[in-house]
């Protein structure tokens, strides 16, 4: 494009910035109806004061081409329509959301706790499971195996966990499906238990394995949160089999599927293996799962 | 005779008016795509528990056909939703900040002074009444539609934030009544937004190709107000 032509076009675009209504210098503003601009428009202007131009058809084609080119980057969004790129893009979107969620997490920000009045009756607290409600845990001989970055690994009895200070909380349980229910939970703080076993507090993750083949992993910041429990009671009674006896994770700062039931072992670690991050996460649900 | 002929544009010229700046166009198309993805995936998310009542006993409100939804199953729908929510909010913020910074918001925002212009405009559109004088960028009915849509977009976002992070955004969730009620308001906001779409598409279709194309190139050819 020649220098003159380019200058001409720049001038055209500058002059055509809409709604910069300027009164003609030789005329004062006039009173008009409400809704109409309170100035006299330049001759040959549209209702927003934008100048109406007469240009050559060739000019028009040039402008069209230029403005279309400016929009071309938007076509990148179309990558979502291409099967090869779709899943990687969606995985990236999920990963970004998880990153933002972790940044947002407040270590001392407490979830709302409720009065007895708000807690649903025990028989209205759903049993939820992916495989079986009762995986047949041998409650008599059950121990929690503790592994990984801890000073005192080994098998721990339920009584040892019950000897730690007990926390009881009425909190909201939110399922990824969209329903929620307020329940009563009791147990030891996960942070107390980890201190008890000499866990490395700077470790990044806690992994959990369950009697029904379910497995999960959580960020240590959430594990150390004051409302994260190694829960062994509901409604003042020991967990029943359907609710994850004898021990489950319970935390109102995470969505339901993070709160693994029928715990058999936990591991403190800095490394998560791809494909073993969590039962539902490995199928496409997000890993952070934070509320 | 000679004067009239001389004042008509010559055949190899066209009459154009610059209507939509680049930022507005970019925000519009990004937002439009995002809205359809969010509604489609959102409906699939809703299908996972199509009720606003208790889990026990569960009483489903409405059966959304799978064909209207995006994502296949809950995890897929959540992936679309958690990806495109950023595009929706990003483009929405881009638009709002641009409108505020340039002062163009005055063209769009529905104010009490516009109420009196609603009936003449509605009568013209729906009852084929006389066409009211065109003296602003958007007529009162348009202003109402666009303002309402932006409002529902903002409410969708705030209720979405309360749903996504009811603990971290407790200050949003609490006034809404907590997670359970935020879910209802989120659905209501979506309905408000959806109410806009058919009217908008019909109006775009009725006003012709040149009008539609101005949201692509920014320039409207043969503007009706020349």
Image (spheres, coloured by chain):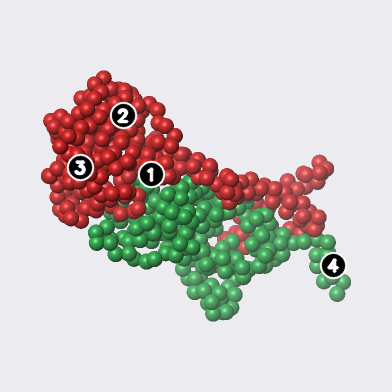
Chain colours: A red, B green
Task: Write the residue at 28% across / 49% down.
Answer: A132
Instruction: Looking at the picture, tell me which residue is in the foreground, B39 or B160.
Output: B39
Is residue B122 or residue A124 the one in the foreground?
A124
Q: Which residue is mark 1?
A: A280
List the residue tagged with mark 4. B6
Depth-wise, is mark 4 or mark 2 nearer the camera?
2
Whole-number angstrom distance, CA of label 3 to CA of label 4 = 92 Å
Residue A140 in view (yes/no): yes
The chain identifier of the residue carrying mark 3 reads A
**Chain to which the residue tagged by mark 4 belongs:** B
Report in which chain the residue with disc 2 lies.
A
Where is residue B189? Give x, y as percent: 40, 59
Measured in 3D between alpha carbons, the distance from the residue under mark 3 to the one under mark 1, in whole angstroms, is 21 Å
Q: CA distance from mark 1 to mark 2?
A: 19 Å
Q: Secondary structure at mark 2?
A: strand
Q: Which residue lies under the disc numbered 2? A: A267
Residue at image point 81% right, 44% down: A1
Q: Are marks 4 and 2 in contact (CB under 8 Å)?
A: no
């Amino acid at each position: 494009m020649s220098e003159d032509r380019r200058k001409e076009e720049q001038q055209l675009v500058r002059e055509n910035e809409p709604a910069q209504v300027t009164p003609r210098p030789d005329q004062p503003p006039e009173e008009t109806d409400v809704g109409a601009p309170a100035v006299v428009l330049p001759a040959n202007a549209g209702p927003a004061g934008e100048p109406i131009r007469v240009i050559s058809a060739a000019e028009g084609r040039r402008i069209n081409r230029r403005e279309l080119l400016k929009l071309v980057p938007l076509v990148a969004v179309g990558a979502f329509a291409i099967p090869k790129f779709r899943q990687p893009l969606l995985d990236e979107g999920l990963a970004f959301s998880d990153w933002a969620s972790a940044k947002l997490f407040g270590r001392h920000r407490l979830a709302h706790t409720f009065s007895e009045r708000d807690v649903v009756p025990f028989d209205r607290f759903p049993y939820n499971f992916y495989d079986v409600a009762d995986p047949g845990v041998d409650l008599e001989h059950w121990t929690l195996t503790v592994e990984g970055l801890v000073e005192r690994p080994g098998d721990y009895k339920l009584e040892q966990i019950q000897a730690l200070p007990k926390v009881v909380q009425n909190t909201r349980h939110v399922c990824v499906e969209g329903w929620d229910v307020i329940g009563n939970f009791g147990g030891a703080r996960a942070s107390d238990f980890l201190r008890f076993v000499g866990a490395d507090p700077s470790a990044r993750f806690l992994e959990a394995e369950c009697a029904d083949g379910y497995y999960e992993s959580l960020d240590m910041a959430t594990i150390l949160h004051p409302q994260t429990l190694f829960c062994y009671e509901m409604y003042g009674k020991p967990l029943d089999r359907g609710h994850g006896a004898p021990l489950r994770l319970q935390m109102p700062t995470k969505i339901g599927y993070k709160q693994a039931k029928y715990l058999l072992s936990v591991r403190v670690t800095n490394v998560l293996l791809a494909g073993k991050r969590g039962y539902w996460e490995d199928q496409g649900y997000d890993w952070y799962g934070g509320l | 005779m000679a004067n009239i002929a001389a004042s008509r544009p010559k055949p190899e010229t066209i009459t154009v008016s610059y209507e939509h700046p680049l930022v507005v166009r970019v925000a519009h198309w990004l937002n439009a795509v995002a809205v359809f993805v969010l509604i489609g995936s959102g409906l699939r998310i809703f299908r996972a528990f199509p009720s606003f009542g208790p889990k026990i006993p569960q009483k489903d409100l409405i059966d959304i056909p799978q064909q209207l939804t995006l994502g296949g199953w809950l995890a897929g729908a959540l992936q679309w939703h958690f990806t495109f929510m950023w595009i929706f909010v990003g483009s929405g913020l881009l638009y709002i900040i641009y409108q505020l910074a340039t002062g163009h918001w005055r063209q769009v925002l529905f104010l009490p002074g516009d109420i009196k212009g609603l009936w003449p405009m509605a009568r013209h559109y729906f009852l084929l009444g006389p066409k009211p004088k065109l003296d602003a960028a958007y007529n009162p009915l348009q202003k109402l539609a666009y303002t309402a849509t932006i409002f529902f977009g903002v409410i969708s976002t705030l209720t979405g934030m309360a749903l996504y992070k009811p603990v971290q955004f407790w200050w949003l969730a609490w006034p809404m009544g907590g997670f359970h009620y935020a879910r209802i308001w989120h659905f209501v906001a979506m309905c408000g937004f959806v109410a806009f779409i058919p009217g908008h598409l019909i109006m775009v279709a009725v006003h012709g190709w040149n009008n539609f194309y101005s949201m692509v190139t920014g320039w409207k050819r043969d503007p009706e107000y020349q």
